[in-house]
Image (cartoon, grey):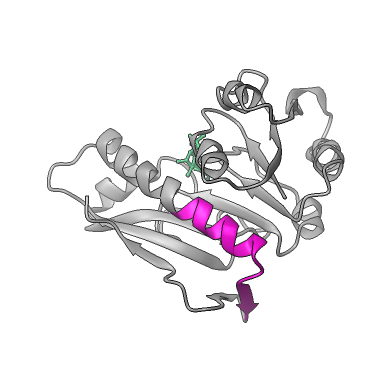
Amino acid sequence: MLVVLISGRGSNMQALVEAGLPVAAVISNRADAGGLEFARSRRIPTAVADHAGFASREAFDEALAREIDRHRPRLVALAGFMRVLTPGFVARYHNRLLNIHPSLLPAFPGLDTHARALAAGVKLHGCTVHFVTAELDSGPIVIQAALGVRPGEQPAELAARVLRQEHVIYPRAARWFLEDKLVIQDAVVRVKGDDAQLVLAAD
Ligand code: GAR
């Protein structure tokens, strides 16, 4: 079982659900997150942990962890969860907290990844699923999808193409985790059975 954390649209959470993964609950830090609607329509338990109501990051993360732990998930999946997490939270879910990030990490951590990639003139861009460590958008890489940047491409078009790949690689990574196929050694992830950890997108 996994719990998915969202802040907005929730298309990656939707991809996890539609791939048939056992999503026990969807938790958002925003009551207006679009993804909550989808989760409710699938009768998946939802909760809102509004960070605005807490005096400190630590207090919020503590409340969030309590909400997560009610479901006793093996895996916690961040899916567009736009909050920086405290070291205590990250440590609590050590090696069972995954994130999806819209760049080929370690390039372009942080926000506005597609515009920054275009501004840098990179020819290859994509997305990454990784285990979460205390540093922002870092941690052992589980799988990446890469695509060629088109000449003159705009950020919105590139974002849409990358998002399609996010929906491919996140369910794959979560399934590997739940099937106990992921081995982390010296901060490098291997998949038992040697399934490909790189998707080269054709479109
Ligand atoms: C996704 O593109 C995800 O990779 C990104 O936010 C978007 C959420 O979309 N996450 C980050 O930038 C985290 N650093 P979604 O709500 O439709 O899944």
Counting every numbered tag in the picture gives 0
At a point 55% along the width and 54% down the height, the residue shown is 137
Residue 92 vs residue 169: left or right?
right
Residue 3: image quadrant is top right
Residue 19 can be seen, yes or no: yes
Q: Which residue is drawn at 83% across and 37% down?
A: 67
Q: Name the spot of residue 72 as percent of width and height, x first.
A: 83, 48
As rendered, which of 147 and 53 lies closer to the eye? 147
Q: Can residue 106 be seen in this view?
A: no
Find out whether residue 130 is within the magenta segment: no
Query: In x, y percent, where is residue 141?
Result: 52, 66
Instruction: State which region is magenta.
Output: 169-185
Q: Residue furthest top?
A: 32
Left or right of residue 149, residue 138 in this image: right
* Residue drawn at x 26%, y 46% as measured from the top left: 119
The residue most toward the front is 20
Depth check: 36 or 40 in front?
40
State whether residue 10 is above or below residue 184.
above
Residue under the point 84% across and 29% down: 55
* Quarter where residue 39 is shown: top right
User: 178 above or below 13?
Assistant: below
Q: Residue furthest left?
A: 151
Looking at the image, residue 124 lies above or below residue 154: below
Picture coordinates of residue 63, whole percent (x, y): 85, 36
